[in-house]
Image (cartoon, grey):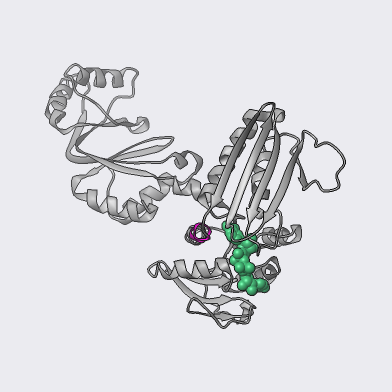
Amino acid sequence: MINLIVSGACGQMGRTILRLAAEQPEAFCVLGGVDPSGLAESEGVAVVADIFDAPRNADIVIDFSRPAALPKILQYCQNTGARLVVGTTGLTEQDQRLLEHACAVVPIFQSGNMALGVNLQIELLKKASAALGDAFDVEITEKHHNRKVDAPSGTALMLANAISSQYPQGRQYVFGRHSMDCRRTKTEIGFHSIRGGTVVGEHKVEFFGKDEVVSIDHKAYSKQVFATGALRAAKFIMNKQPGIYNMHDLVTEREVLSHLYTDDGQAVITISSLPRQVGVLSLVFETIAKHSVFVDMISMAAQCGSVSFSLPREQLATALNALNELRPKFEGLDIHALDNTTKLTVEGPGMALRHGVAGQLFTVLSEAGVGLELITTSETKISCCIKNSDVSTALDAISKHFEL
Ligand SMILES: NC(=O)c1ccc[n+]([C@@H]2O[C@H](COP(=O)([O-])OP(=O)(O)OC[C@H]3O[C@@H](n4cnc5c(N)ncnc54)[C@H](O)[C@@H]3O)[C@@H](O)[C@H]2O)c1
């Protein structure tokens, strides 16, 4: 259960976050809201004007308010040990420096756009910029409702920063072209802000080339997409060390483990006391291959002179008979078989980008009392053989820990 304080509680985003948090009572408990609007309550939650009057036992402050709120919020977090999710846009360089200073002690999640789709747009823009290069002129048009106070939007700046990062010299930002009596340069990104009605948020990035235009757009149809992202960010930041995190970190962590599956009917053979001489392993596996045994995972501890491998359970007897042929050649050979195992595999593209996944997985399994008989890994996959009787415990523990 995460104890929340919502700053900007009476605003559009604040109210949406309060509503969504109330729909997840098992995950969130809202302790209160902060908003100087004069209202004493928002979505059934008590609101105070000053964060220093809010309950001091919050795990996380979620802020969607105004940049002026930031110094007090950071002070509150430093005083109480609360973590911070910042969605407020229009922060100045000085505000950004405050965040960078505070993140030495406070875990902070900051994103000018908490929608997952915008994160994808950013990745597509990086690819498009790298592919299209200097031959295309880049212009960003953003549209928002008539109550938005900052321009350009924080998201437009995030998109431009992603594009600029693809050029060694970066890009210059030009905000509107009123009164500019000169041609655009090749190295600029133009920003255009439109405000009106109830538009939630639209960002269109156009790459203008000779006789062709490439456009990469995102449209948000409700504030809910941002609120959902903010609550995801709150869960993400709960177990993080001090530092600044963003949507990219959240998305890659979510994809660290995306698939979990099992393959039962496996057996594991371990051969120990193998002599440390060249050609021993080829002799072992050639011998079983001659009997048409399919070997799957192989793991070896050369220093200990032992090798383990998995195979279909129905081929265990054949493999053991074949290995007995080796006994006269290697004195004291120790062959151990386990015939009631299941291969459990976890997979995810984000594993290649993140360290510590194997450590987390083995901790989860050992805390659940699950022993490992054999392990193999690749860049994006970890497979282990476990006893059949441990399978449901292992699946529960992994699914819960990695939110699969
Ligand atoms: N990161 C994102 O995904 C995302 C999405 C939408 C909006 N935003 C940003 O979030 C902020 C709020 O957006 P909104 O649409 O809810 O605006 P809003 O105007 O509806 O609400 C802002 C609220 O903040 C309150 N406020 C003003 N000063 C405050 C202070 N010092 N402490 C606490 N509350 C204070 C106001 O009284 C108001 O109720 C804006 O900066 C907006 O650009 C970010």
- Give the total number of marks visible in the rendering: 0
Q: Is residue 210 left or right of residue 180?
A: left
Which of the pair 181/288 is nearer the observer? 181
Which of the pair 191/254 is nearer the observer? 191
For residue 50, say whether it is visible. yes
| Residue at the image position 63 percent from the left and 51 percent from the top | 155
Give residue 113's position: percent from left, percent from top: 58, 54
For residue 105, say whether it is visible. no
Give residue 295's position: percent from left, percent from top: 24, 26
Is residue 225 rendered magenta in the image?
Answer: yes
Q: Is residue 133 above or below residue 54?
A: above
Q: Is residue 303 above or below residue 3?
A: above
Segment colored magenta: 223-228
In which image quadrant can residue 173 be found? Answer: top right
Residue ranking furthest to the front: 197
Q: Is residue 381 above or below residue 192?
A: above
Ligand 1 shown in quarter? bottom right
In which image quadrant can residue 256 be found? Answer: top left
Is residue 261 rendered magenta in the image?
Answer: no
In which image quadrant can residue 291 be found? Answer: top left
Give residue 321's position: percent from left, percent from top: 12, 24
Q: Is residue 287 left or right of residue 112?
A: left
Give residue 220's position: percent from left, percent from top: 54, 53
| Residue at the image position 41 percent from the left and 41 percent from the top | 348
In the rendered image, the quadrant that contains the N terminus is bottom left
Which of the pair 403/384 is nearer the observer? 403
| Residue at the image position 68 percent from the left and 33 percent from the top | 208
Could you tell me what secondary structure mostly forms the magenta stretch? helix
Q: Is residue 151 above or below residue 40?
A: above
Q: Is residue 232 left or right of residue 185?
A: left
